Amino acid sequence: MPGTKELDEEADGSAGLDLVERLRCDQTIGATGAQELVVAAGLEQAEDELAFEDVDPRPDAGLRRVAAEQAGVPRNVGWLYVLPGLLFYGLFTLFPLLHTVYYSFFSWDGLTGKTWIGLANYREAFFDHVLRRSFVHSGVLILFYAVIPVILGLLITAALTRHTVRGFRFFRTALFLPQLIAGVVIAQAWTWIYDDAGPLNALLRGLGLGSLTRPWLGDFGWALPSIGVIGTWVTYGLCMVLFVSGVQKIPFTLYEAARVDGAGPVREFLAVTLPGLRGEVLVAFVL
């Protein structure tokens, strides 16, 4: 028969096994309960979110929704707001344009009856050297009034904004000043400058270039460029102000990164400044 000591050891071992089994059961039950609690919390949160999304804080939101569904509000209601503008644009712009195209297929003096001639007017316009010359003159004015002012504005902006310039506000105001002068004053001033006895010819005579003096506005070869110079002088200040304001919105970190990469002034202008001024350049060309 086993002794008392052996019986005590068996009893202790059985008690230990029971304790281990009980702990395992408690852990299993606890884990299951925790999972159930997590699932329940997730479902409750989802229900709260759905309830929050479904509930509109406006007191009459439900009534408005029902009224809209019943009334059948059109989805393209936004076109109703632009319809008046479209009507005026079509009436006073598109319709006259189409009417002009229609008349271009006729020979008509505006008083007598029209005669259908097809594309004869277009052929005549294409081969008419006087009309082609007028297009060339328009191109020259576009060059002086749009292209050159934009280029000058970009160069001046690059010179004024790359480094700190003393009297920056003074230069900006002085260069923009032609935009503030009345057109009548500008016309009178440049007429005096271009006069045969004006300061421009006097300067040329003083430099020993008297052979270059001429009545600038009366010369068939120089009248158009002379007027173009006036347009450039008036317009480049506006372009400069637009570009200076545009440079201020370009992050300075881009310039620092370009300088760290070893970019010089020209490369920095082409890679950072010019791409950042695309919108302003477009506006300058349109104006």
Image (cartoon, grey):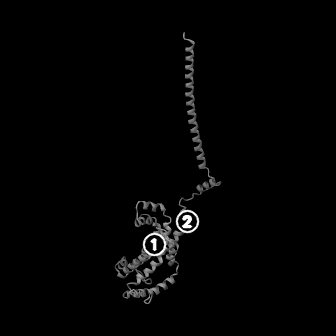
Residue 202 lies in quadrant: bottom left
* Labels 2 and 1 touching (C-beta < 8 A): no
Which amino acid does the dot numbered 1 rest on? Ile
* Closer to the eye: label 2 or 1: 1
**Residue 257 higher or lower than 105, as above or below:** above
Name the residue beneath numbered marker 1.
156
State which tag comes first along the sequence, 2 or 1: 2
Residue 76, above or below 55: below
In this view of the protein, which residue sits in the foreground, 43 or 248? 248
Secondary structure state at the residue bearing disc 2: helix
Give the x, y percent position of residue 24: 55, 28
- Marks 2/1: CA–CA distance: 43 Å
Q: Quadrant of residue 275?
A: bottom left
Tag count: 2
Q: Position of residue 268 (x, y in %)?
A: 42, 64
Residue 287: in sight, yes or no?
no
- Residue 95 seen anywhere in this rendered image of the structure: yes
Residue at image position (42%, 75%) is 148
The kind of residue on which mark 2 rests is Tyr
From what the image shows, is residue 264 above or below residue 228? above
Bin the neighbour count of mark 1 within 10 Å (Cα to Cα): few under 14, some 14-19, many 20 and up. many
Which residue is the extreme one toward the right? 59
Quadrant assignment for the N terminus: top right
Q: Nearer the viewer, residue 43 or 28?
A: 28
Name the secondary structure under disc 1: helix
Going 55% across and 65% down the picture, which residue do you hit? 81
Q: Which residue is mark 2?
A: 81
Q: Position of residue 160 (x, y in %)?
A: 47, 70
Residue 130: x percent and y percent? 37, 82
Disc number for residue 134: none
